[in-house]
Image (spheres, grey):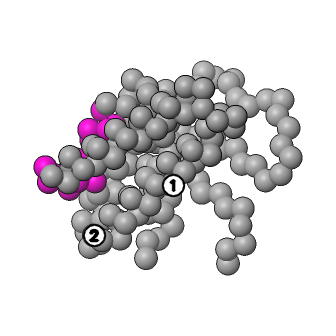
Amino acid sequence: MLDEAMVALAASVGSGVVQAAGTDAWTALRDRLARVLGRRDAHHEGVQLEHLDRTAAELAAVGDGGPPDGGSAERARLGTVWRTRVEVLLEQLDPAERAVVAAELRTLLGEAAPAAPAAGAGVAHNVFHGPAAIVSGDGNVQVNRFDARP
């Protein structure tokens, strides 16, 4: 079982894949993530590249006149798929190897992160009708749950 930091890291990777697809950061993130998840095995890296390419294609299709919700459900689903893949990998590793892979993933996410917004930029004039979370910071990870977990 993974600790909260590893679960949060996996969630960040899932979000990062979805956010980077179709951007200038995609190619670098795609290649490096495939290497990390494939554990530098050529066959496994190829499988991960196929998964990543399929994800990018699905996200591109959602963006091209997709569902009325703007594809948010599909984006969330794909983020969860990648979070789960990373969790499965991390669970299979011994603690020392898990620490190495976690460091590689954190570095990858740090390099793929978009530039910080301009000073004074922020969220304003929003109305939320239910649970909501706004996260701001410089690369911090926060996990918000709106369910009844103990």
State the image coordinates of residue 50 (x, y, percent, origin top left): 29, 44
Q: Nearer the viewer, residue 119 or 92?
A: 92
- Residue 2 is labelled as none
Residue 21 seen in the figure: yes
Residue at 38% from the left image edge and 48% from the top image edge: 106
Quadrant (top left, top right, bottom left, bottom right) of the N terminus: bottom left
Residue sticking out furthest to the left: 42
Residue at 30% from the left image edge and 71% from the top image edge: 92
Q: Quadrant of residue 109?
A: top left
Q: Is residue 13 above or below residue 137?
A: below
Residue 36 seen in the figure: no
State the image coordinates of residue 135 (x, y, percent, origin top left): 65, 44
State the image coordinates of residue 96 (x, y, percent, origin top left): 25, 69
- Crowding at dot 2, Cα within 10 Å, few <14 / some 14-19 / many 20+, comes out as few
**SS at badge 1:** helix
Q: Which residue is mark 1?
A: 80
Single out the mark in the foreground, 2 or 1: 1
Q: Is residue 107 magenta?
A: no
Q: Which residue is mark 2?
A: 93
Magenta segment boundaries in residue numbering? 28-42
